[in-house]
Image (tube, helix red, strand yellow):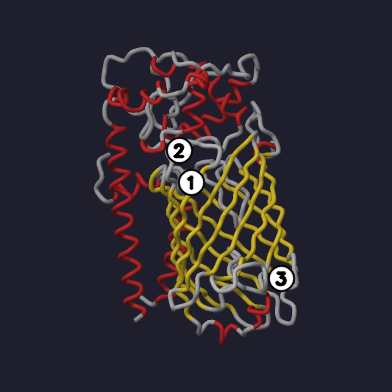
Amino acid sequence: MSFSRFVRFALLTSFASLFFSFSARAQESPYIVAYDHYLEEPGNLEIEYFSTFGTQRGGNDFHSYWMEIEYGATAWWTTEFYLDGQTTFQDSTVFTGFRWENRIRPLKREHFVNPVIYVEYEKKNGADKILKEGEGHDVETDFLTPNAVARKEHIHEMELKLILSSTFKGWNFTENTLAAKNLSNSPWEFGYALGASRPLALKASAKRCTLCPQNFIGGVEMYGGLGDRHNFGLHDTSHYVAPVLGWNMPSGWTLRISPGFGLNDNSHKFLLRWGVSREISGFGQMVSKLLGGRR
Amino acid sequence: MRRNLVNLHLGVVLASASFVSTINGQQNNKATGDQGAWRPSIYAELAKAPDKARARRNPMEKDPEAVAAGRNLFEQHCAECHGGTAEGGKKGPSLRAAEVQNAEAGALFWVLTNGVVRKGMPVWSKLPEPQRWQLVSFIKSLGVAPAKEESPQPATRDSPLPPR
């Protein structure tokens, strides 16, 4: 089986399971870049699709997209697999790589500030444009390289994040510090993401409803790079601010939308992101039964 | 090269799935046994609630809509583990046990907020405080389940809740 056939098979299987399975309604955060301290419920699988349209000065605008398959292994460990790609208008469409991330919650109770350790391995190529994080000296002009050239650069990267998140009077505040290391002898690069969000209503309605304000969570996130080990700081870095809105539907679907704005000349002027996800309950039990676990 | 890469990825995915399903299997085995098996471990969490948390009054106590709202929240977030009737499900213990029904509202709120992370219950502080109190109102409204003579079967998500 060729690699592209394997990817197509994996995508089709995932979408089939998405439509023919039990759904669970979770209270998903509206963030697209920042993470809070809430992990996937154990045994649940969430399938997510995200899309980013970005403007490019001096070159062609682009549309990047990624799919996330997120699984709650335990109440303190969530593991996630990404496949990503992009289309640069008037250039080409390319598969840009995969990521495997793990989030671990070291403390067993809720505190005023809740840490989560994030560890990710990325195998991507230089054409990656999903802008899932701001790191190092990444700037808009890096994206001018044509896909045919950029995809020849292979990147193996480890990424570590410390997620510090608090929930207070319905508000969530989160701060993510990022350190990434290209495993081919590049210096450590740093970045950050900040987020604040709140449901539009704190009390739930006594009626079952899709459009009730408690199903919507609004907020804002900000993210960018902080240079590298040799040149730490804001010099030659890009930064974005993005309002976010999430809509958790009782049917198990979640929609997110976020227009992002570059804050300096190194940033893309505008990014429009949106995503759709669906949570499948009891996926772990299904796999467990399949592999001979006790019923 | 690509075939090796695919084999490697499949290997990693299958190994992860086996590991994860083993963990889930262990959790399920705990849950599918006698509901009484939960008592020493899970219900003990209620006793761990600090006095300050235990003493908190439910601000939704007199809200006439709190139970109905709590029911909706329960169906959306809790029934999957605790069963449609809240009498215990595939992963979670009965919430109609005397230990839960006789616990202070503040203790239930504390367990909801903090979860029992090491034993599989996630933290629910992602639900705003009023919603957690609405859930407490609903759970307390259920009352203690009548004792069953036979070994109880785990409730399914589709099992109906008591009538409104």
Q: Is circle 2 on the same chain as circle 1? A: no
Q: Percent x, y for residue B96?
A: 42, 19
Where disc 1 sits, the SS reads loop
- Looking at the image, is B3 positioned above or below residue A217? below
Amino acid residing under circle 3: His
Q: Could you tell which of marks 3 and 1 lies nearer the N-terminus? A: 1
Judge left or right: residue B32 versus residue B83: left
- The residue sitting at 67% across, 41% down in the picture is A198
Total labels: the figure holds 3
Image quadrant where residue A10 sits: bottom left
Reading the image, the residue beneath label 2 is: B122
Q: Chain of mark 1?
A: A
Reading the image, the residue beneath label 1 is: A39
Judge left or right: residue B20 versus residue B82: left
- The residue sitting at 41% across, 37% down in the picture is B117
- Looking at the image, is B43 positioned above or below residue A123? above
Image quadrant where residue A74 sits: top left
Judge left or right: residue B23 versus residue A50: left
Q: CA distance from mark 3 to mark 1?
A: 30 Å
Q: Is circle 2 on the same chain as circle 3? A: no
Residue A129 is tagged as none
Residue A268 is tagged as 3
Q: Is circle 3 on the same chain as circle 1? A: yes
